[in-house]
Image (cartoon, rainbow, N blue to C red):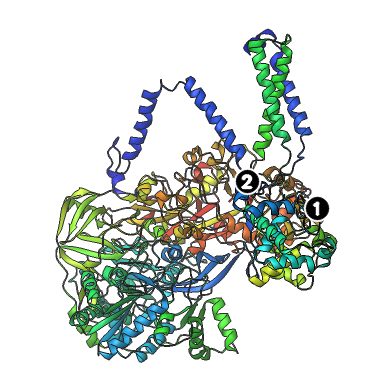
Amino acid sequence: MNHLYRRRKGFPALTALLFMLLLQVFSQANVQAEKKTFVARNQTPVHKTDADLQPDLLIGERLFYGLASFEAGKLNCEGCHSTISSEAMNWNPSAYDLAVWIQTKKDENLRKAFEAPSSEKMETSHKNLQINEEEAKKLRTYLNWVHSKGLAAHKPFPIRLIIFFTFGLLMALALIDLIKTRFLKYRIIHVLVLITGLAVHVQMAVVEGQELSRTQHYAPDQPIKFSHLVHAGENKIDCQYCHSGAMHGKSAGLPSVALCMNCHNIVRNGRHSGKFEINKILAAYQEKRPVEWVRIHNLPEHAYFNHAQHVAVGKVACQTCHGPVESMEIMRQHADLSMGWCINCHRQTNIAFDQNAYYHKNKKLLELVKSGKVKQPTAETTGGLDCMRCHY
Amino acid sequence: MKKYWKSLEERKQEPGKARAGQEHEVLAKQEIIDFLEKGGDQIRPGRRDFLKFCGFGVATAAVVSSCKNPVNKAIPYLVKPEDVNPGESEYYATSFFDGRDLGNLVVKVRDGRPVKIEGNDKCPVMQGGTTARLQASLYSLYDQATRLKAARINGKDCSMDDLDRDITARLEQAAAQGKKTALLTATIISPGILAAIESLKTRHPGLYHITYDALSFSGIRLAHKVAFGQDGIPSCHFDKAKVIVGVNCDFLGNWLSPVEYSRQYATARRMSGNKPEMALHYQVESCLSLTGSNADVRIPLKPSEEGGFLKALYNYLLTEYGNPADHSHRINPAEIGEALLRHRGQSLVVSGSNSPEIQILVAGINHLLGNYGSTLTFGDQLLTGRGDDAAVGKLLRDIESGDTTGLILYQVNPVYDHFEGERFLTALKKLNFSLSSSPYSNETTAGCSHLCPDDHYLEAWGDHHPKENLYSLAQPLIPRLFNTRSFLESLLKWSGDTSDAQAFIRSHWEKHCYPRQERFQSFESFWVNSLQEGVFTLPAAEPTFSLSEETMARAGSNIPADGKGYEVALYESIGLGDGRQTNNPWLLELPDPVSKVCWDNYAALSPATAKALNVTQGDLLKIGDKLVLPVLLQPGQAASTVGIALGFGRTEAGKAGSGVGKNAWPLVSLTGDCFSYSLDNVMLAKEAGTHVFAQTQMHHSMEGRPIIRETTLDAYSKDPAAGNEMHEKIEKHHVTLYPEQEFPVHHWGMAIDFNACTGCSSCVVGCQAENNIPVIGKEEVGKKRLMHWIRVDRYYSGDEENPEVLFQPLMCQHCDHAPCENVCPVAATTHSNEGLNQMAYNRCIGTKYCINNCPYKVRRFNWFRYNDNPEFAFGTENALGKMLLNPDVTVRERGVVEKCSLCVQRIQEGKLKAKKEGRLLKDGEITPACAQACPSKAIVFGDLNDPESEVSKLFRNPRNYYLLEELHTLPSVGYLTKVSHRAGNTEDQHSH
């Protein structure tokens, strides 16, 4: 490409300018539209080999998807009991949930579930539904298979990947045309294509690189469909009723199953999910087996964070970092938890100087404030930007 | 100017020639030169390299794009215990006694696992102090490789029930056959265990109990029995003494109760208030001990001369009563005698000898001086050291004759530490059964038919009665990690008692301790309080007794004449003691405070003796007919004596400790009824071969600068700034072009009092445990890569054969004008607005410029990811060992620089506590690990912004100075000039 630069002297500067501009425009336009999902499970439709081994499996799958008729008529289980982990809250038990449930039950229970629904919610959704013994067996075979495979991950449309490869292809074509075929007469077109392509690629590399270990918008499937919207939003339960550690120490903590039971001893029937989800808590409590939640907020190990400092001392609202939790059906990571984000807040946030004797009785600090050297002490004034506040 | 030197090698080093241990440096340099010279032309990137890089780039992109964030689980409690909060530490009191060392401790427990040992402030005896060995005792809890994990019969794992059935059957069988079973233990100070032994004896009448302490104090006990009819070891009160005379007695390091004595000694030596007064300390000894290093006057003497010297001293004291003077001994006792006579009732003479005759003399001297009742008391006598030295010999005869057919061992390892260890091992084979309750595999367990592993002390209930008026409790701080059972519970089981250890101890305390107090109205509140505080104390009542002249005369006539030829003096090292914790890499890597050697024992010879023998450092020396040890030139070692540390040379200690050094226990002999730890007329011969030591002292030199400043008491009483005149001069010259840095809230500082610091190195291990400092092994230490964040520098001055010694604990000085901060190219080390010199490990790229620019040489480079590396398998490489790590401190990766942070995690914790409670931070609320571990409280930490804080007061003390203050680094660590009675100290301090 050297000869290009030789012809026009002002070109490098212009290129750089254009490059920067493109970068800027592209990063603005490319607001995080996609949610990152980190579901480890994967599911594909039933393989032919699996089906050969178990003839019931294929029929079971077809029954589940409503492709084959039950004796009582056609019905689509999958319509409610999804086989894909979805982005929005689906209150109905997923196919995987059913599969887990059925592991401990007999075929009879499957049929009984239809005949005598355990909750109102279930009764309304399974009205007039009946299956016979043979069908129950086939469905079980399919659900067993789902249990072994897990749910399919929700895959967002790979728009960025397509853009990446499109530009890659365009640049390759431009290069070939520039050197060999010389089909296009105006070389400015090649140059423009190359510059734009490069800009897009660099932008993507930078953005993806930065986000390698960051998990903003992370909203994994949880073992129990717990809705903060229902608990913190509609029922107005205080955040610290469950996350009581936030006032005292480093970790805000998750509530113990016993704490859930304080309410769910009485509240046994959910408005959205019926008994299915709440029963999971009961089972955990009775079987003395703690619930394995998926951790959403993961700080890097070399960063020290203490909830009490922020909640008890700094009086920072939970929502400042965790976002509008009370309106989230599925809990997700609100902030990117990057160091820049921390530092920025430390620069802007005033400390509770007047309220806390630790600050206003400190002679040195008081002197600084009185003398006007420090107008309004922020976290930065008291060392909030020091490395060893978070890294030691 | 007074000349300080730190090693003999340095003095004699030929210019241009590499010192011992420096060869590898030269080699490494040569490799780099070779590479640059030969390879220089070839490093030109070619087409293939280009393709390689392209390929690498694509591969990286592929790997990076396919990498997924891991899915982490968060598993809350099923039912949360009320007082346990995840991520928060709890502190519980407990106590420790392993048959040798005594400790009242507070243990930091984080998420259900003990992570740090600290001293218990509530204990009136220890007052929050610890030794290096107590600090390190946590390590063995997580020692995956060495801990025994289940009961075993004849090499096969079995359940505890199977073992119980087998043992009970064998005990009954022995009784039926009229045979005896021996219970061989170290001194037991647990009232609970003693009671359980009694009930076991009742159940199995053929059982008898014998006590064996490898490092014995039976001499003192017997002496007091003979002299006063008091079978016990009196408590010493060094704090009440104005004159202290130690004869071969390392009371600051290993003798009886060193934590207690270090604190008392510091009190006696500290310059407090306006009255310039301090105890005068004479030390007469063979090896240059920690205590000797602190003495005002130190007189070297051969071990065999000890009796003669004390006899002469006793006779000198008697001249006061009209007896004729005795000038028969080489060392004239006049000076010491005079000093003692001036301070009757306020002096203390102690001897480390285990000979009852010598101890009778010592008791006579103290009695003559009226020290009993003031500096020596029986009302709070020590209950440790109850061993019967002749017992093992008798046991061996009983086993060999077939009288005794069963043996139960507790806290003893006679195969290793008895001089007839081999005979013992053979005898074990003759027994019907031999059961060891050791929690770790050792030399003796290797020969035992039955193993019934004891719990680690942090897993079990226990109680101790270390002093007549002091009881303490031990509580479990973690559930059992393996299928073990506490010895107390085993005893109870075998005696048919079904109660568990906790219930047993509780009921024992209810019967024996509760009625002796009036503070609590119910046993429950008494019990809870005792558990919380860890200790229960009673007022001490002093008995009265007298001494007959006749006893003294008999003892005097039994004193043997001075020995001839070369003599061997055996001693316990500060790190390993008698060898119980020899598998502890923290202790193995702890440099000996005086010789600065780690990972080895050696034959210490004075330079003159070495010359006479024609050997030099690193040469091998054959001692007697068996032992071969490398020679270490130790200034201050008495002429014609060899000092050898016990506790080394274990064969079955474990991965870290086996094969380190040589075992000197076989040199111990039985004289009368007591062990003797010295021998005379020893043949010494040079052997072929050399040995390389891992000595940490070669890193550090005073280079003629006034690093430690000292003065005499006389000069100090005239001018408190004596010896520290230059401080004021330098303070006047502080000029800077830069704006002064503000410390708007706190300005942390630390002051170290040389008059209180004894050099014991407890701080080093305390810091190591707190800050996840890796152990790196002998080879790496030899390459000068020691990772300790705090070290204790030792400097010699004066006569090569009897030098004066100075200690200086040195950590990052947290300079306000830090030279390291200016040179970091990536700003990984910066200054905080609380005056801390911060180190951000994740920013550090390992250029080591900071290390080069630090005038104090306190920064460490992590070469090999030591903490998680099978090549450096010192515990933390396995999953269990990782539980040792402090979760509040980052485990550093390789390739980064690390150093003292003034325990910033503790500062943050303390500040947060004050903020949460909405109050000012109290002075003394935050204690860094080193200050916490210090038994003599020589390290004071606090806020310099608060003029009333202890550290601010010390900084205003005219004795205070900063290290290399002429460089204008403005350190936040201050040192207080050492004031002593040492003659001629001021010889020329002024010329600095």
Identify the chain of the residue marked 1, using the numbered disc in the image: A
* Secondary element at image label 1: loop
Q: Is residue B72 left or right of residue B262?
A: right
* Picture coordinates of residue A276, whole percent (x, y): 75, 64
The x and y percentages for residue A34 are 75, 41
Q: Quadrant of residue A116?
A: bottom right
- Nearer the N terminus, badge 1 or badge 2? 2
Closer mark to the observer between disc 1 and disc 2:
2
Separation of residues labelled 1 and 2 (CA atoms): 46 Å
Q: Position of residue B631 (x, y in %)?
A: 24, 53
Labelled pair 1, 2 in contact (Cβ < 8 Å): no
Q: Is residue B882 visible?
A: yes
Task: State whether discs 1 and 2 lie on one chain.
Answer: yes
Place residue B309 in its image quadrant. Answer: bottom left
Most foreground residue, B195 or A323:
A323
The residue labelled by disc 2 is A48
In the rendered image, is residue A294 in sight? no
Q: Chain of mark 2?
A: A
Are there few (<14), some (14-19), or many (20+) residues within 10 Å of tag 1?
Answer: some
- Which amino acid type is shown beneath numbered disc 1? Pro
Give coordinates of residue B607: x percent, y percent. Answer: 23, 52
Q: Nearer the viewer, residue A259 or B475?
A: A259
Q: As shown in the figure, which amino acid type bears the numbered disc 2?
A: Lys
Task: Report how many numbered discs are placed on residues in the image.
Answer: 2
Q: Using the image, determine if residue B420 lies above or below residue B16.
A: below
The residue under the point 19% across, 71% down is: B327
Label annotation for residue A324 = 1
